[in-house]
Image: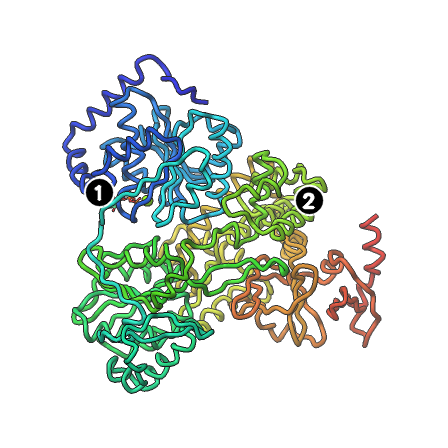
Amino acid sequence: PWSGRVQYDGWLQQAQTRIRESQAGALYGTMLSQRERLPAYAHRSHILATLLSNRVTVVLGATGCGKTTQIPQLLLDEMILERNEDVRIVCTQPRRISAVSVAERVADERAERIGGFVGYQIRFEKEVTESTRLLYCTIGVLLQQLQSDANLSAYTHVFIDEVHEREMSSDFLMLCLRDILRQRPQLNVVLMSATLDPTIFETYFSEFNPATLQIPGKTNYPIDEHFLEDVLAASNHHIEVLRDSRGNILTEKEDPETPRLTKQEIQARLQCKPHVAQSIFNLESSPFATTNAELVASTVAFIHRTRPPGAMLVFLPGYKEITDVKALLEKDQSMWVLPLYSLLPVPDQKLVFQSPPPNRTKVILSTNLAETSITIDDIVYVIDSGKCRVTEYLTDMHIQALVTALISKANCQQRRGRAGRCQPGEVYRLYTRYNQEAMKDMIEPEMRRTPVEELCLMVKVHKLGLIRPTLTRALDPPELSTVDNAVTLLEGIGALDKDENMTHLGEKLASLPLHPRLGRLILYGHLMGCLDWACIVAAFISYKSPFFAPLGREYEANMAKASLAGLCMSDHITLLKTYATWRSLMGDRRMQNKFCTEHFISQTTMKFAHSLVGDIKAMCTKLGLRDGGVRNDAVFRAVMGIGLWPSVAAKNRKSVSAYLGDSLSRVEIHPGSVNFKIPKEMRSEAMTAWYSYYQIMRTAKTFVYDSTLLEPAMTLLLAPDVKRVCERDGRGVFYEIGNTEQSVVIPSHAEVDVLELRKGIAE
Ligand code: ADP
Ligand code: MG
């Protein structure tokens, strides 16, 4: 570990010389003139003074003001060039891609090589040398280092960037850092955020008297703001009274004598169709009941008709709303309507950066993808529905739900900032000022809306003590029942023993960069000789499915997937087949692309998942796990069944059910699954089919996503409570599972008494 002193005599002088040489070059000067325009650079002396006189600093500033690229860099130069002191700075990034691109940008700005003074490290990839003094890395990398260097003695300054995103790993890192700050007086921590209210961070680190730096100065052009009440009044100064569903007044009436606008008046002002006026009128009673596609569309049309031409960016909660609004807008040929969401193939996503065809206005309908991840420069108008899709954790059912929720004030601010990047802009908010006041400052932290198995394992890996008391020290601790579920699961899969000690298995699971359930799948794959297949499936599950169904072409897409599946009755085996074909076409780009296009497969997802498969296999090799060359569907079904147990769903002619928490609940197979329809050849009445699955999520219904048909006997061996019912109509012996009224049939000719067999195993 780094001692805080210069590595060897003369290092500092050499470093100073090298930095000054780069600074003397023409390239550095060109970059410097760009940097000088950034607020973070302009305020450097104040920023440095604050950073250097406080152990904990919270830095706030709008996106693009130069926090990430400038502040750590300024500190580096100040220490080495001005103070003649060595430093070690690490700056975490929430995404792999930003760690790399920011490091490269900073090296460019300094006219230096990447991997010199400035480097990056993400899992499996790094540009770091002895001379690296500013390291951009993912949070995962820093947590990994923390395991072997509990005091982070390798660093003098730790920057956590984008703390407002409140990812589970960044909250966990803060928990660790607070302990380290107590133990190691030399450590300095800087939290950087784009958000408005620093109070929670200040309070969390209050024992170190944190300083707060607000970087002033706008990077954008001015933005005019309109709220729902203004939109409805449509340039008229009378503000409408809006009430929420409980009848509370949402906005102040500017002129109490003005009666509420009638439907006819709304229609006249917005020049919209009667039913649109009606739906706007109805908003008064319940403005947030649904996302009103017609209100969104009529606002877009209103801007298009009455405002100077300019590209529009519409924020909608999800895919469905995008589809609805697109259908309403597409009739108008003067608009170029482009959807934007994460599952959209990349070439389609890239369209949003292009200029529209002549005489057409670009209208982008986006999820919150365009909020931070993608920046489109020519946006003049932002239309914000005020909602987004987020996950929630339903503790009693042990599943996640995808719900539409109000965004936070921080999101509002961020969405607004997407307008006016290159010229003055406007934001039309389809919620009232009152609604905005009621919004949370920030989004619900990830720790409070997801299962926490990985977090619990991290507590153990970092030897922080007992899970429950440790987690109560987090910035926003997870619900106790969520922690209970996680501990139960970890005990159930054998990662923790009854006293919460990490088992040998648990250590293996924790060292895999995967959810422990997928880690378990991989270990079974290893045991049963098909590790490679398990790695491939685990990689796709932990990333995403490469299959996509474009708007209006779902049937075609499903047919294409079914053609790959054949009769395997498994989305996972279909993935294996698809991946094998895709790999065999590696040498022929054209054929590979054709294969992807014809089967509605995302080439980008395939490429990323492919690299992930490689990473996971490399990790397994390091752990001493080997592939045994078994390539057998039946064996693989068994691996899926045991590996993912107890995630099984039972499907009979009437319904599908799954164990959620302690009981069996009604679920649905997702229409995109190859198991949504049972092929004719496989149909047989009264039979229950059992499927193994990984992901289940409640949206409109509770959907089981990818699934694999299990061999009946496998289900009987695994299920906790099996009763032999009787022999019926010559088809075989029926076994009932629990009180589920779901049965498994073992054909008579294969009859072995499964109950006796189970006893044998148990003993
Ligand atoms: P912040 O962290 O405050 O959001 P950054 O430090 O990431 O801001 O970026 C500051 C500015 O530097 C950006 O507005 C952009 O103009 C410029 N910049 C950052 N990264 C790059 C890059 N990879 N290529 C070109 N310009 C960049
Ligand atoms: Mg940044």
Residue 760 vertical placement versus 666 (above, below): above
| 485 lies above or below 550 | above
Q: Residue at x 23, y 65 (%)?
A: 311
Q: Please tell me in which quadrant of the rendered image residue 94 appears.
A: top left
Query: How far apart in space, not on screen, are marks 2 and 1 (Cα)?
Result: 52 Å
Estimate the x, y position of residue 487 in percent, counting from the top left.
65, 47
Q: Position of residue 281 (x, y in %)?
A: 36, 81
Closer to the camera in the image, 235 or 459: 235
Front disc: 2 or 1: 1
Residue at the disc numbered 1 = 38
Q: Secondary structure at mark 2?
A: loop
Near-viewer residue (320 or 713): 320
Q: Secondary structure at mark 1?
A: loop
Above or below 195: residue 362:
below
The residue positioned 58% from the left and 52% from the top of the image is 479
Q: Which residue is mark 2?
A: 494
- Amino acid of disc 1: Leu
Left or right: residue 236 versus residue 495 is left
Q: Which amino acid type is shown beneath numbered disc 2?
A: Gly
Whichever of callouts 2 and 1 sits on the residue coming sooner in the sequence is 1
Residue lying farthest front? 257
> Of residues 442 and 403, which is closer to you in this image?
442
Q: Is the CB atom of the residue marked by disc 1 within 8 angstroms of ligand 1's nearest atom?
A: yes
Residue 392 visible in the shown view: yes
**Residue 594 visible, this orientation:** no
Q: Is residue 719 left or right of residue 328?
A: right
Left or right placement of residue 386 versus residue 579 in this view: left
> Which dot marks residue 211?
none
Rendered image quadrant of residue 585:
bottom left
Query: How far across and how far down the image is residue 621, in percent?
Result: 56, 37
Q: Residue at x 23, y 56 (%)?
A: 377
